[in-house]
Image: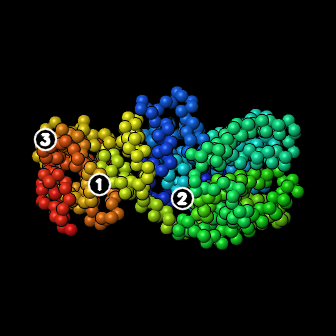
Amino acid sequence: MDSGRLFKHILLTVLFLAPAVFLLQLLGDLSAMPSVDYWTAADQLLHDDGLHLSSFFSYFIRLNEHVIPVTGLIYAFNIVLTGGSNLGLIVVAFIASFFSVVFLYRLLPEKFRDHYFLSLACGLCISLFIFSCAPYPVWYEGFSGVHWQVATFFIVLSLFWFHDFAEHNKLLALIFSLLSATLACLTYSSAYVLWPVLFCLAILYRFSLKNIFLILLSMTPVILFGVYFAYYFGFEVEAHPVHNPHPLTTEPKVVLEYFLTYMGAYFFNFKYYFTKYTTGPVIVAIIGLSLFVILSLLSIIRNHRSQFPWIGLAGIALGNGILTVLIRGGFGTGMMIAPRFKCITALFWLSLFVLFFSTCLPLLKNKSFRTAVFTFLLLVTGVGHTYFIFKTYRAEIRKRSLEMRVRDTAALSFQLGTLDQKIFETSVTRNVPQMNGLRSRLIGAGHVPFRDQDRICPEKQFPTEKGEPSKSDALRLQKGKKVIDGLRITSPESEALAPFTTLCIYAENRSLLGRLGTRNLFRAVRSKKERFSGYLRTQSDASGPLSVYGISGESCNDPPELLAHISLADGGSSGSKWSTLLGWAKKER
């Protein structure tokens, strides 16, 4: 490889990664604590004796109508490597998205990739669509990111190999394509529509009957998994939500409206999740679909085979729109504008973007002028799209970033056994009984939020001698709202406490009763002067004074420093005034 090509590949890699870095910067705070549907999967993966990694069928987890063994495998290895951290799943989602960008770039027509600056502009634009901030919950929730982005990667990979087979007639490429399609279906049900799309593409490519038969034969496993959709639609009552009507009971007019809303909602952010005002998305969808039909017909009539994969990619988005209307339509219009679905509709608008420029590129005959004009238009359209999406979703992203802090608070309360139920149900899961049932298995597996407990408050590094408190005068812990079996506690900012990032509270028997972090976690008592906030467990057999230790940084290389002794002489009971105890500050109501 010559130096010029090497430099181009390096530059392309930088352009592929730039939107991902921008998105990470935009997301702000991320929490290691997973949420919502992840815990249903963890409930199926974790057993009393830990993970059963050697059992193939243990990965066949089910979430609603989704049967997702590939996702279950990713969850299991994430538990082994990171203790089930949400951050580990987010990394997987970003890696899958990056490789989606790489293979989508390889699918570009050669007339784009042959021009130096035009190819760079196209690579950047593809990355801007894939790393769009429109489906922001997918990037915050690692489990959702794995569902959508890993499935999207396998979809793109399948289309890439399918096109390669069509162009070079290599049977191995067809096998790779069908294998990738199967893996996509086992990752998330958004890939089920890939099979009819491949069948339609086989007709467009004018495959032989032998190859078409092979594709139909490969659809058999998907048909078997489709039985779960039959369960969802009423054959098994428990699997069918009462408030989600059978698709045949929905009026065609409503189905069409929901479908258009789904396709056009990518460019809109609704302040209220459930809304009836969807005129904007419907109009945008009609324009986009009309343009797509025209461009697709032109590509088919002219037999522009390089554009067929992009027609297929758009078809996958359209098929998902139809499935979403049929399966989720009972939840109303609000479900059609759910942000997580926008990572699929982004594929439609990206495909339309490529089809439009592919069709218009040959219209200008002068090669240099054509390259300059289309490079400029690509950059303006791609960057302009990103700026518009950023402006549209910036407020929601900022709100979600603040919610991540609340989730860390909820994780801490669950870890200490002082469940702050309101915060926990809002930010982690409403299924508290499920989490209580999982608690012993999470501890046994070293799962978040129990994975870092020993690292952050390491008992083995405690001084052998009790010693004297070093900062009794500086430490003032203030009692807050009562929670289950405990209290919220905060500490005002103090220069003497500046070196510490964590405060751990231990009983005389060295059992951990409380922990405070430097992040300002409680929105209800938020103040610029607060530095530490956390929880203290009051329902305990511990007696005598409690010891507060300070931890510097996250490495825990230095032994903890004894800061103060405190007392729970009043048992943590609530009242109009807290008495001044050792280390406690007054709180007037």
Mark 2 neighbour class, 10 Å CA radius: few under 14, some 14 to 19, many 20 or more: many
Q: Tags 2 and 1 in contact by the CB under 8 Å rule?
A: no
Which marked residue is nearer to the observer: mark 2 or mark 1? 1
| Quarter placement of the N terminus | top right
* Helix, strand or loop under label 1: strand
The residue beneath circle 3 is: 466
In the rendering, at what x and y percent does residue 206 appear? Answer: 87, 45
Tell me how far mark 2 sits from mark 1, CA to CA: 31 Å
Q: Nearer the viewer, residue 292 or 264?
A: 264
Is residue 126 or residue 220 the one in the foreground? 220
Query: Mark 2 is on which residue type?
Result: Tyr
Which mark is on residue 483? Answer: 1
Q: Which mark is residue 136?
A: 2
Q: Is residue 399 above or below residue 236?
A: below
Task: State which mark lies toward you, 2 or 3.
Answer: 2
Residues packed near mark 1 inside 10 Å, few (<14), some (14 to 19) or many (20 plus): some
User: Left or right: 517 with respect to 35?
Assistant: left
The reply to whether residue 390 is in sight is no
In front of the other: label 3 or label 1?
1
Q: Kindly state the secondary structure of the residue where label 2 is placed.
A: helix
Give the residue at x 16% y 41%: 508
> Where in the figure is residue 519, as x and y percent of width and height?
33, 57
- What type is the residue that disc 3 sits on? Lys
Sequence order check, earlier mark of 3 and 1: 3
Is residue 405 found left or right of 106 in the rendered image?
left
Closest to the observer, 529 or 114: 529
Residue 377: horizontal and vertical position, in percent?
Answer: 70, 67
Please report whichever mark, 2 or 1, sits nearer to the chain's N-terminal start: 2
Q: Is residue 465 visible?
A: yes
Q: CA distance from mark 3 to mark 1?
A: 30 Å
